Image (cartoon, helix red, strand yellow):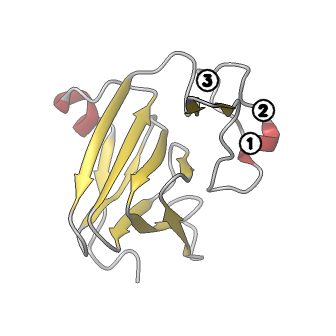
């Protein structure tokens, strides 16, 4: 797995080994609570997104952008393929406290299993015209 160059050195190959899930580096715990550094580096956007149970998000592919998606609450079934020519469909359940990585050119889809909140972290700005220019929508039946 190629680690995004815009992430800082707190991330290494080991963090991306369970792809698409990402191990979160530098957890800090003391009597006050804990700190999870879910992203560090030159980032274009950080968005908090809410999703209702059984709703679908993504079902698209980005030409240049990558994403980290950290599940704050709830859960989703995350679908992906390595590229547009890949016939092998993969999926994994992502629960609260877990994060997945979507590289550029990887078709992906999220189906929320319950009301959920996640943080989407991307390299590029999510200003609508920039986001849409980098995004290709997929047919509803692209993922089974």
- Label 1: few (<14), some or many (≥20) within 10 Å? some
Q: Nearer the viewer, residue 54 or 37?
A: 37
Q: Which residue lies furthest to the front in this view?
A: 31
Question: What's the residue at 58%, 33% (across, down)?
Answer: 36
| Residue that appears at 60% across and 76% down | 88
Where is residue 118? Give x, y as percent. Answer: 37, 48
Q: Real-space Cα distance between discs 2 and 3?
A: 9 Å
User: Compared to 107, does 43 lie above or below?
Assistant: above
Q: Which residue was labeled with disc 1? A: 15
Front residue (pair 74, 7) = 74
68 and 134: which is toward the camera = 68
Image coordinates for residue 75, horizontal then vertical, percent = 41, 66
| Element type at mark 1 | helix
User: Can you identify the residue that label 3 sits on?
Assistant: 7
State how far apart marks 1 and 2 are (Cα): 6 Å
Mark 2 vs mark 3: which is more N-terminal? 3
* Label 1 – label 3 distance at C-alpha: 12 Å
Q: Residue at x 27, y 46 (%)?
A: 49
Cβ atoms at labels 1 and 2 below 8 Å apart: yes
Around disc 3, counting alpha carbons within 10 Å, would you say few (fewer than 14), some (14 to 19), or many (20 or more)?
some
Q: Position of residue 11 (x, y in %)?
A: 71, 30
Would you name the residue on which mark 2 appears? 12
């Amino acid at each position: 797995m190629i680690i995004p160059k815009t992430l800082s050195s707190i991330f290494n190959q080991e963090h991306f080994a369970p792809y698409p899930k990402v191990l979160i580096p530098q957890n800090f715990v003391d009597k006050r609570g804990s700190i999870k550094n879910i992203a560090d580096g030159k980032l274009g956007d950080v968005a908090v997104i809410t999703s209702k149970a059984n709703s679908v998000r993504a079902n698209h592919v980005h030409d240049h952008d990558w994403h980290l998606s950290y599940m704050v609450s709830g859960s989703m079934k995350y679908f992906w393929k390595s590229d547009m020519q890949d016939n092998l469909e993969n999926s994994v359940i992502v629960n609260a406290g877990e994060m997945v990585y979507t590289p550029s050119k990887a078709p992906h889809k999220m189906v929320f299993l319950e009301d959920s909140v996640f943080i989407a972290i991307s390299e590029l700005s999510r200003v609508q015209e920039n986001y849409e220019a980098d995004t290709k929508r997929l047919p509803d039946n692209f993922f089974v």
